[in-house]
Image (tube, grey):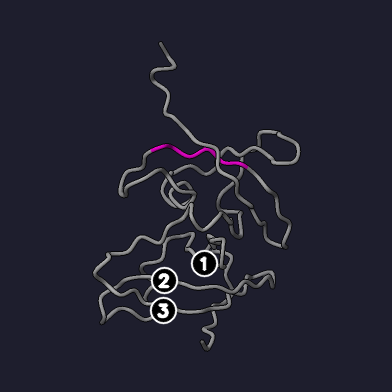
Amino acid sequence: MLESLSVPKRRVAAQFVLPGGASRNVAVFLAEAAPGHTGGERLSDLLNNSGSLFIPAVDADTDAMTFVHCENLALARVAAELEPNVVDQFTIPTEHEVEVTMMDGQKLRGLITYVLPEAHSRLTDYLNNSAPAFFPVLEGERVALVNKRHVAYVETLRR
């Protein structure tokens, strides 16, 4: 009877990176459906909207269950297909190639993409007002979900 009340979850591979650069490959458990968008829950939903300070994850090497304090993650990475950048198909998004420098000196390069009204479409508008706590940076085949609290600066790069 209780099994019929459980929420179906799927196991998704991710990499959690701590301040200082230590990383851990884990599996997180995401719901098959999510409010606010089509398709299943994304890691960004879990990090930005779950309301949980700690999220469960299974260590990929030891298979141990761990509970990760979200606010202390510098960033999390998943395969790009698991974090689709869904924008209105009739709107051309704003894109910036950037280098993000974390407070501990770690750096990552990638693409920040968003859609905002033209009057408020600067990168600074996005970072200050619209970007979620863990904002996405596309790194080729992966998406880094970067914790704003651990960012020292974001530098735009020439294309």
In the rendered structure, find residue 138 and report the number of the disc placed on it.
1
Give the amino acid at mark 2.
Thr
Dot 2 crowding, Cα within 10 Å, few <14, some 14–19, many 20+:
some
In the rendered structure, find residue 151 and report the number of the disc placed on it.
none
Q: Who's the residue at 44% across and 17% down the image?
A: 3
Q: Which residue lies furthest to the top in this view?
A: 1
Which one is nearer the viewer's eye here, 33 or 107? 33
Give the amino acid at mark 3.
Leu
Give the amino acid at mark 1.
Leu
Q: Who's the residue at 26% across and 72% down the image?
A: 91
| Residue 12 x %, y % | 55, 43
Residue, disc 2: 113
- Inter-mark Cα distance, 1 to 3: 15 Å
Magenta span: 27-32
Q: Who's the residue at 56% across and 67% down the image?
A: 140
Q: Which residue lies furthest to the bottom in this view?
A: 158
Q: Main secondary structure of the magenta part?
A: strand
> Which type of secondary structure does the marked residue at label 3 adopt?
helix
In the rendered structure, find residue 123 and report the number of the disc placed on it.
3
Mark nearest the camera among 3 and 2 is: 2
Dot 3 crowding, Cα within 10 Å, few <14, some 14–19, many 20+:
many
> Which type of secondary structure does the marked residue at label 2 adopt?
strand
Q: Do the residues labelled 1 and 2 touch (CB within 8 Å)?
A: yes
Dot 1 crowding, Cα within 10 Å, few <14, some 14–19, many 20+:
many
> Which type of secondary structure does the marked residue at label 1 adopt?
strand
Q: Is residue 116 above or below residue 141?
A: below
Q: Is residue 69 above or below residue 90?
A: above
| Residue 126 x %, y % | 38, 73
Q: Earlier in the sequence, mark 3 or mark 2?
A: 2
